[in-house]
Image (tube, rainbow, N blue to C red):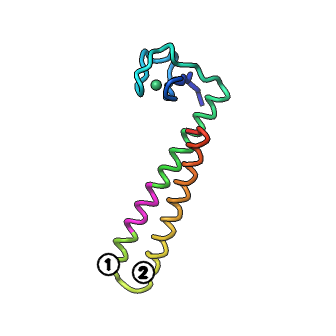
Amino acid sequence: MILNKLWRCSVCGYVHEGDQAPDKCPKCGAPKEKFIEIYEDDAKKIYNSDRTNDIHMKIINLADEMIELCKEGIEIDLDPGCVSTFEKAKDEGWVIKQRCKAELETHMKKGKW
Ligand SMILES: [Zn+2]
């Protein structure tokens, strides 16, 4: 994996990727001089947590889709076996979703974003 340089806005924490700091922070409008380069180890951590957080968010979306499918299956109500299978999967989808959300929250508190 090729890592680009990363720069953090010292005013708001926005992370910019590129050879140079941006002229102006896209989040808070702070000038270029307010950006501090993030060095290799920390940059690696940021790239890794960026990917990990994306994976968590994709899993949350998949769990949401699963819950919606289960609701549809429950409504169709083909037979009790189907309904009970969908009800269980719906509850499991909820658990998967909430577990990922809780994990994302701990990442944010630790600045792994
Ligand atoms: Zn900023």
The quarter of the picture where residue 40 lies is top right
Identify the residue under disc 1: 76
Disc 2/disc 1 C-alpha distance (Å): 9 Å
The label shown at residue 110 is: none
Residue placed farthest to the front in the image?
11
Q: Is residue 17 above or below residue 45?
A: above
Identify the residue under disc 2: 82
Residue 102 position, x and y percent, is: 55, 54
Check if residue 63 falls in the magenta segment: yes
Check if residue 78 falls in the magenta segment: no
Q: Which residues are magenta?
A: 61-69
Residue placed farthest to the left in the image?
76
Quadrant where the image shows the C terminus:
top right
User: Residue at horizontal 49%, vertical 75%?
Assistant: 88
Quadrant where the image shows the N terminus:
top right
- Report the front residue among 112 and 47: 112
Magenta-drawn stretch, dominant element (helix, strand or loop) = helix
Residue 30 position, x and y percent, is: 44, 19
Residue 108 position, x and y percent, is: 55, 43
User: Residue at horizontal 55%, vertical 24%?
Assistant: 6
Q: Amino acid at mark 2?
A: Cys
User: Circle 1 sits in a helix, a strand or a loop, which is it?
Assistant: helix
User: Residue at horizontal 44%, vertical 15%?
Assistant: 31
Q: Are marks 2 and 1 in contact (CB under 8 Å)?
A: yes
Residue 45 position, x and y percent, is: 63, 34
Q: Is residue 11 above or below residue 113?
A: above
Q: Amino acid at mark 1?
A: Ile
